Amino acid sequence: MEQGEKPILRSGQEVQVARYRLTCKTLPRLEDTIRIGNLFRLALMSLGPDRVPQILSGKDERGCPLQEVHQHSLFLPEDADGDSHIDHLLFYSPLPVSEEVVQSLCGLRGLCTSGSFNPRKARMCGDVSRAYDVRRWPVILEGIGTTRDIGNDTALLQTSRVWISCTPYYHPWFRKKHGKFGPIDQIRHETRLRGLPDIVSAEVLADGWHTLNHSETDADAGEQPYPFGFELVRSGHSAKERIPDRFGRYIRIMFAEPVTGPVVFGYGCHYGLGLFRPE
């Protein structure tokens, strides 16, 4: 689709994917992936009915996480031009979404943070209600439909045997004693849970633990919990949340058979961490 061309949704057309372009001058950093991904999800949820569809909330009627393996949606920030800034957003659902979700996807105009209180702004404007630093990122819908409809618009939806990390992979479970069930074991386990082809090879290209412990700076490890600079805590969640892996790694994986994207694994993968692109 040409830039600026408005996507056309045919009557009765199935929708699994929507892709947006950020139009602001100052784009968010790629390191803010999990925060932007979470804001993306919250924005879509706010546009729908009072009872948020499960495909967006990822929870059942009781408010418990869905038990099916990865049967809820992905809210993926994307750095399409490789400049380490988020310039696109990709929504993906493994199943066709309902009409009410389609309306939410078509109605999205941007992301917004609630902002933090700014005392200086309060003194200047004399109105406490306007004294918050609110950040907004306007977006334009560039494509909507199935992976076949817009798969050529982004590398994330292409098909390949070999995939390489766009954002660090953080293993989602705690390791066992003596180093067993490490990152590569866990990513292989995830592929089996999702019914994907076997991984025939996996190579760690950069490891956060090695990066942190061989840094040329004098920063104490306690002051630098995330070696690659990626945030690991979503907005509204406690910074004390127990996270199995705070170091992360970039990985190159080869499947036994071609796999069609999006390919995401590990902690925070629904919001863009552990995201892969075809090599």
Image: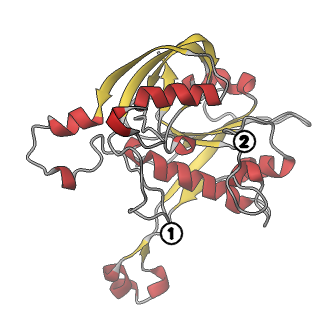
Q: Nearer the viewer, mark 1 or mark 2?
A: 2
Colouring chosen for the image of the structure: secondary structure
Q: Can residue 66 be seen at all in this image of the molecule?
A: yes
* SS of the residue under disc 1: loop
Q: Which of marks 1 and 2 is nearer the N terminus?
A: 2
Q: Residue 131, percent across and down?
A: 42, 80
Q: Which residue is drawn at 50% across and 63% down?
A: 113
Do tag 1 and tag 2 residues touch (Cβ < 8 Å)?
A: no
Q: Name the residue under label 2.
A: 68
What residue is disc 1 on? Answer: 114
Q: Is label 2 in a helix, a strand or a loop?
A: loop
Mark 2 surroundings within 10 Å by alpha-carbon count, few (fewer than 14), some (14 through 19), many (20 or more): few
204 is higher (above) or lower (below) than 228: above
Quick check: 165 left or right of 63?
left
Residue at horizontal 62%, vertical 52%? 41
User: Taking 187 as reference, is 64 above or below it?
Assistant: below
The N terminus is located in which quarter? top right
